[in-house]
Image (cartoon, rainbow, N blue to C red):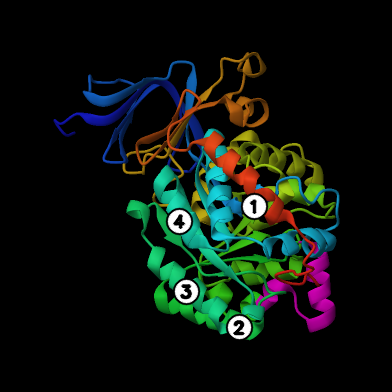
Amino acid sequence: MSDSPADLVITGCTALVHDDQERIGFKENATIVVRDGVIESVTTTPAVVEARQRIDARGQVALPGLVNCHTHAPMVALRGLAEDLPTEEWFNDVVWPVESNLTERDVTLGTRLACAEMIRGGVTCFADHYFSMGAVAAVVEECGIRAHLGEAYFSSQGPQGREASLEFALRQRGGAGGRITTALAPHAPYTVDDADLTATADLAREHGLPVHLHASENRDQAEASLARHGVTPIEVLERTGILDTDVLIAHGSGILDRDLPLLERAAGLTAVATAPRGYLKFAWPTTTPVRALHDIGIPVGLATDGAASNNSLDVWESMALTALIQKSTTGDPRWLTSRQALHHATLQSARAVGLGDRIGSIAPGRRADLVLVDLTGPHTQPVHDLAATLVHSARSSDVRTTIVEGRILMRDRELLTIDVPAVVAELGERLPALVDRSHGKRIQEYDT
């Protein structure tokens, strides 16, 4: 241990920890010492440690920061704009016409608002798949959050879409002092053709980049792909080489039994992000097959998707909904347990975005991405089972403090790095131009 003062010491908390079998446990009256953005120690018999900053966290639980494994942060500007619509009309009549108006400034403001919402909800890292991602990266740098970013593209853009995605990924990789990681981001097999997917897989292998895309989002997509092409979207990923890369698949609620062997033998690190609130809202008939994916060793990370479909970026809600929907769809109240849900929210989500060796647990050597959760409210008392209290009773608004790389981004519910009123005021001025659909244009056609 260094003789110099630690950057941060948190005392008196109950810390969520993993044992060597990755089982969830809790250390009471823990002291967490942070130095140079890294957790130096987690002890229950604290020595006196000098520190530049101290937090007395009695009555609070320290969790690894939550990871939003798939979102479109700037789309908070469209929150509540496209309501009570089927998927096809949602895209074609509202979202894709509005996105044809999108400017870089809209992206900046939307991302600032999204990051404020996520930091307040205990999210310390998000995986984003959108446009004007240079603006998103700049917001990540200024507000202190961690992010896994990809510039989305369609084949309708021609080769320059794919080239721009590569250029962004190479330029921003390792940005914001290492808080930014990057991916190639083809939109989906139904908007990106096989030639582009094959070229993307080749680029991913050549440059050591992962791929982040939507695939088998719902059962209709899987059935339409089978009817038109004789293959499922997952089989498209296999034949184009995408499954030979490290790939993060968004949603996967249309993954079929025939897809599971392909995913199991995929050469790269394959993960799926589940965002269950949107599936309920769109009345999709199936959800992400979490149990089947678990049985073949595929990590499933928690996500919200964009706030245009989900209406919030609340990963806490995604954690509870994932557990509840799994109980309902499997007919088994023993699956998903609260401890399993916390595992999805921590280590599995970190693995899904390629950061399983850096974040996702509170342990020496891990990056100090932490949140402190206040359980003194009436809705979280008494505590008989701490895991169940965290998953099913606590809310994102119970997060008191959010820390990334040892830097406090929110302390006692006060955001320290984003001026929300200024963002809301400027975004409000821009909304009439952003939401105008009188031009009749759209950036893409949804037709699966």
Q: Nearer the viewer, mark 3 or mark 1?
A: 1
Name the quadrant of the N terminus. Answer: top left
Could one spot residue 343 in this view of the protein? no
- Earlier in the chain: of badge 3 and badge 2, it is 2
Q: Is residue 303 left or right of residue 309?
A: left
Front: mark 3 or 2: 2
Quadrant for the C terminus in the image = bottom right
CB atoms at circles 1 and 2 under 8 Å apart? Answer: no
Tell me if mark 2 has few (under 14), some (14-19) or many (20+) residues whose alpha carbon lies within 10 angstroms of its own.
few
Badge 1: how crowded within 10 Å, few (<14), some, or many (20+)? many
Q: Which residues are magenta?
A: 218-236
Mark 3, residues whose alpha carbon is within 10 Å: few (<14), some, or many (≥20)?
Answer: many
Residue wearing tag 1: 75
Of 8 and 410, the residue lying toward us: 410
Question: To which residue does mark 4 refer?
Answer: 137
Residue placed under numbered mark 2 in the picture: 158
* Residue 342 to residue 177: above or below: above
Q: Amino acid at mark 1?
A: Met
Q: Residues within 10 Å of mark 4 (few under 14, many from 20)?
A: many
In the rendered structure, which amino acid carries the disc numbered 3? Answer: Leu
Residue with the mark numbered 3 = 166
Residue at the (57%, 52%) spot, across then down:
69
Q: Is residue 383 above or below residue 347?
A: above
